[in-house]
Image (cartoon, rainbow, N blue to C red):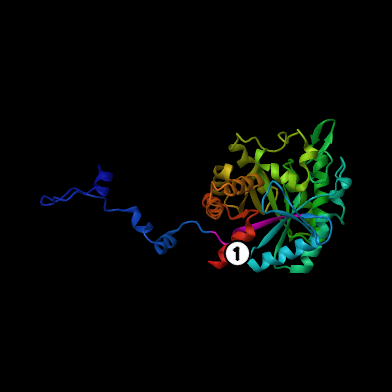
Amino acid sequence: MWLKNLFFPAPAQTQTKPQFPCIRMRRTRQADWARRMVRESRLSADDLIWPIFVQEGSGQRSPVASMPGVERLSVDLAAAACAEAADLGIPAIALFPMVDPARKNEEASEAVNPENLVCRAVRAIRKEVGGSVGIMCDVALDPYTSHGQDGLLRGGEIVNDETVSLLVRQALVQAEAGCDIVAPSDMMDGRVGAIRAALEDKGHSRVLLMAYAAKYASAFYGPFRDAVGSASSLGRGDKKTYQMDPGNGDEALREVALDIGEGADMVMVKPGMPYLDILRRVKDAFGMPTFAYQVSGEYAMLRAAAAQGWLDWDAVIMESLLAFKRAGADGILTYAAPEIARRLKQG
């Protein structure tokens, strides 16, 4: 009864006009200035991390067919792109390599080569932009293995502890090259603690660690695997023995808790939009700096629908990123970062 009286007060004896709510939610929606004044979630360039694919060569760029608008860049062009990111106010970029197939093998030995593509790119970017943009490096073996898996294969099984030892070495060469954030995305057990301990031991205590803490065995990664050249290596294989089952939510909280306990500075949920419920639960449970990855499949499907005229690209990309913010993300990895930053800069 009290709720009815709140919204529909009893009419006075002399009142003859129809009764309407005293509380009208539409009042704050009636003008642009009012909508902006009461908006709960906002997007700024500070929320963006730009994933960049790097390839060999000089002055070279090649389009990723399954990701319209995204290109692989040679190291010199990647460094120039990072200068653009700095101008746009994007705080960090994330590097992912397209490794020459001749350099791939079952032991992922190129991952720990101090002169590998990622390490050269880190040094070139640091020379170009100094410390104005943070450089994040992916700690995972799939770009380097001939079988496309994130771990070492022994007797048909991905072995955990031996893989972790190699991931530690990979993180160290990245830190020594000058990266600011190492981001283990492999989902091996115990890798965050092992990497954090090794960084501390080798004098890299200032290097941040962003854990892909809740990374699901998702069907939305396909275009990314095209971009880094691991799709053909993986073939019909899958990563279900180490990435999370899409049906599980409580398990994500356990994974995140473990990574925080092992020394992660930031945590990530991946993919993004299909897992907004997980993102919200993680942020609410831990209050940690929490990031989401708008993965390649999410980006590609929005681009494809827009190309067909079925969706308004400018509207849906902004709405999707606001959804991440509303769900609790402190930052978002998105391939649309530069164009979003330009739009925000223009007002």
Residue at (82, 49) in percent of width and height: 99
The answer to if 136 sits in the magenta stretch is no
Q: Residues within 10 Å of mark 1 (few under 14, many from 20)?
A: some
Task: Choose between 332 and 30: the one closer to the eye.
Answer: 30
Quarter of the image for residue 134 reads: bottom right
Residue at (60, 62) in percent of width and height: 341
Outermost residue on the top side: it is 155
Residue 340 left/right relative to 157:
left
Identify residue for label 1.
342
Residue 78 left/right relative to 308:
right
Quarter of the image for residue 152 reads: top right
Q: Amino acid at mark 1?
A: Arg
The stretch in magenta equals: 43-53
The answer to if 52 sits in the magenta stretch is yes
**Where does the image place residue 270, in percent across and percent down from the top left?**
64, 45
Q: Where is 329 relative to 32, above or below?
A: above
Task: Choose between 31 and 138: the one closer to the eye.
Answer: 31
**Where does the image place residue 226, in percent across and percent down from the top left?**
74, 44
